[in-house]
Amino acid sequence: MGATLNGLLFYVCAAFSIIHLAHSQNQQGFISLDCGLPSNESPYNEPFTNLTYISDASFLHSGKTGTIHKDLKTHFMKPYTGLRYFPDGIRNCYNLSVMQDTKYLIRTVFVYGNYDGLNASPRFDLYLGPNIWTTIDAKLSGPGMAQEIIHITRSNILEICLVKTGTSTPLISALELRPLPYDTYITRTGSLKYVDRIYFSNSDQGVRYPEDVYDRAWSPFLPVEWTQINTTLNVVDPHKDYNPPQDVIKTAATPAIASEPMTFSWTLDTSDDETYAYLYMADIQKVRNNDTREFDIIANGKVEFDPYSPMKFEVEVLFNRVPLKCEGGLCRVQLSRTRKSTLPPLMNALEIFQVIEFPQSETNQDDVIAMKNIRDTYGLNKISWQGDPCVPKQFLWSGLRCNVIDVSTPPRIIALDLSRNNLTGEVPEFLAKMKSLMLINLSGNKLRGRIPQALLDREKEGLKLTLDGYLRTCKSCKKKFPVVAVVGASLSSVAIIITVVVLIFIFKRKKPSISKVKRSSLELKNRRFTYSEVKDMTNNFQVVLGKGGFGVVCHGFLNNQQVAVKVLSQSSTQGYKEFKTEVELLLRVHHINLVNLIGYCDEGNDLALIYEFMENGNLKEYLSGERDGSVLNWPSRLKIAIESALGIEYLHIGCKPPMVHRDVKSTNILLGQHFEAKLADFGLSRSFLVGSKTHVSTTNVAGTIGYLDPEYYQKHWLTEKSDVYSFGIVLLEIITGQPVIDQSRENSYIVEWAKSMLANGDIESIMDPKLQREYDTGSSWKALELAMACINPSSAERPNMTRVAHELNECLEVYENLTKRRSQDANSSKSTGHSISFVSDTPSAR
Ligand SMILES: *[C@@H]1O[C@H](CO)[C@@H](O)[C@H](O)[C@H]1NC(C)=O
Ligand SMILES: *[C@@H]1O[C@H](CO)[C@@H](O)[C@H](O)[C@H]1NC(C)=O
Ligand SMILES: *[C@@H]1O[C@H](CO)[C@@H](O)[C@H](O)[C@H]1NC(C)=O
Ligand SMILES: *[C@@H]1O[C@H](CO)[C@@H](O)[C@H](O)[C@H]1NC(C)=O
Ligand SMILES: *[C@@H]1O[C@H](CO)[C@@H](O)[C@H](O)[C@H]1NC(C)=O
Ligand SMILES: *[C@@H]1O[C@H](CO)[C@@H](O)[C@H](O)[C@H]1NC(C)=O
């Protein structure tokens, strides 16, 4: 229905000429790029809107500039008369610096205007980062084309890419970003793609900035069967969030035949698409006291919002909180007067959106930063090196190989071929920071100097590093190099030089005798303690922190540092194997979210493990209130969940070979002084093979009842997804505060209990009452859905730990953004609660 965005934006002479510029507004956070504008003409104020446009030149490195045919220029606002086109490369990207986690209206404008005199009709794709946004078909004679979405930025960089799909050359005229309040235009998933934005009037004037403070573009529209009413009086907007312009709400439509309903419809691409509608309502007729205006709102034949009466001279926005789907993609909404109503229905303005998903995760940010570093350090101006390095696959940067698991997992770069690139200078050390790299080819370049130690260390861990031979033989210069440097740098200090020389001498002499094996046994030795040392440490096992099947955990001191000493009871035969597993594993792996092993004692029958001391005990104690009744608040719980997830993720993908913990549970998550979470107890951990085998079969099922993956239990297949299941149970404990097994509950197992509560769809009954409702629905639902996904009976359906950690991070972000906004709102004493949902708001249980 209605005019399109395209029609509106372009015929400016008619549409915008009488807009008054009287009220000056601020354009804070607006990004207005006039693509193709020469830098020396930038910036300028566009005369109709008074918006300040700047040149796009500093936001990308490619493309050529042009202007539309001179005869067409008068039809368009100045920013849309120039353009940038991209004859080279497949994908060309703008890199915009934006505010992170901010809701933006993003508008792209394309006017071909026969700039090249070819009378062509270019067709190409538009991408938002690694995700396709839409296909652009910029006709020669048409008014051009605009695309608009409302989207929340995930980082402080937004990439908008134009992708050549056939023979035609992509082009762009303008790029406009407008920040919106975070709590407007809420969608349950994805982003919102513009379908329509109209106000009901027989005027021929579009409305934009500055009338619309967010620079939404409103088209006037009035179907023949409706009639316009208007007012000169002010229409109050007490809410100040959707901020419709006065020009838009001072007119309204009612049916021309007063007894008829008002019906409007729109189409979506498919039956599966979801849509949101925003209805702007204000009664702007002076009505007699004995008159009523009341109507039902019926969406797709179903009454969604029963009797509604618009406020008198006060605007309200009605929208559906739950996305609507429409049979065959055809959506129909009807405003139908009730029996009691003496006046026909009325509506002032309408916005319609379709949900658009951008599912593909961007490549791991550390990898991206490293790649940009390489590009900038070596001035590699490769045309394909734009946009996301790994995805979509067809635009993979040349010389890279990536590991792309699924859309929800950020891809990692695993191989980098920079051979024959005329690279000069030192061998880049920062490559060592790309932890997922397995292969680097730097041969055929003119690099010099020594190979950085960090890279050599990575090589020992299995990185395949291909370099020109002379760099390797250059090893001898490695020893000379520091001497020269020191002599040069410290002529004033003879002592330092002597020390260095002595150290080098010792180093030279000792080096051949230190083989890899010996060094690790040396390390082991340093961490080995005698039984009498352990006795001293714990003051003869005086303070017992806890007990378990294995023995006891005692408090102790080692060089004034607090430690926890796990003493294994001599009776347990299984104990020794687990003890060995744990020592071997913890000496090998190190991660901030795994408990740190300081040492061990292995003296005949006396076995002990010495760990760093974790002041706040284990997570279970906190959740069950055993710990002096103090309660972990919601953000702390999310933080603990994130950190534990990262610890497990490290075992799964950071270790070589990968490990499965096999006993993830809330008592094995320890909390430090500042509630930092660390995973403990690796006695049952197993490595599993990588390669074609995706699981290991085990004869003994080990683990803890309640946390045990049913698939592992039944099939004896062990995969890292068993830990994901156990973690899902921990997450449920974190969210609900419920014991895992509680015979006094109707559903004694927490999983069954959660499912039954979910069926009621009531979040408050699931959440831990100790939280006293100090949480938001967004992040709590998301966490709950994640927990349910982790405990999916089929391991293949469960997310991996990378995904889990990522989603938990998003939960925390959702929560933090909300609290941030709440405090801002509190400052501006803003009223809320007027936005009425016309579809009931019950989240679905999964
Ligand atoms: C136009 O915008 C500028 C700032 O960009 C402002 O200083 C000026 O007052 C505005 N003019 C009008 C007529 O609003
Ligand atoms: C994108 O812009 C940001 C901020 O201006 C900058 O830090 C970053 O290096 C740019 N990235 C690319 C790929 O040009
Ligand atoms: C109200 O509508 C009438 C009839 O269309 C029109 O003549 C009049 O100019 C309008 N007034 C305003 C304030 O728009
Ligand atoms: C409302 O009141 C007016 C007079 O004030 C009267 O003419 C009219 O019939 C009344 N309408 C109804 C529906 O009662
Ligand atoms: C490294 O690059 C060179 C030159 O392109 C090539 O000959 C060699 O096979 C590459 N080595 C590996 C391990 O990919
Ligand atoms: C490297 O330099 C040579 C000679 O200057 C040049 O022909 C070649 O194209 C360059 N290669 C690359 C990848 O830049």
Image (spheres, rainbow, N blue to C red):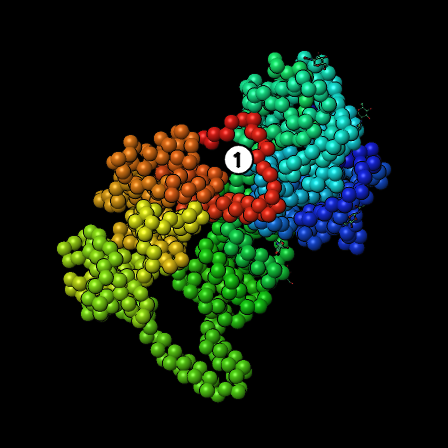
Q: Is residue 774 left or right of residue 179?
A: left
Give the camera-side residue of 692 and 280: 280
Give the camera-side residue of 142 and 338: 338
Dot 1 surroundings within 10 Å: few (below 14), some, or many (20 or more)?
few
Q: Is residue 694 left or right of residue 414?
A: left
Q: Quadrant of residue 108?
A: top right
Amino acid found under the numbered disc labelled 1: Arg
Q: Position of residue 501 (x, y in %)?
A: 43, 83
**Residue 790 shows in this picture:** no
Quarter of the render that holds ligand 4: top right
Residue highlighted by disc 1:
188
Q: Secondary structure at mark 1?
A: loop
Image quarter (top left, top right, bottom left or bottom right) of the N terminus: top right
Give the camera-side residue of 567 and 487: 567
**Residue 93 shows in this picture:** yes
In the image, what residue occupies the spot 27% across and 57% down? Answer: 582
Q: Position of residue 803 (x, y in %)?
A: 44, 45
Image position of 297 with respect to 170: above or below: above
Image position of 793 with respect to 63: above or below: above
Give the camera-side residue of 662 and 746: 746
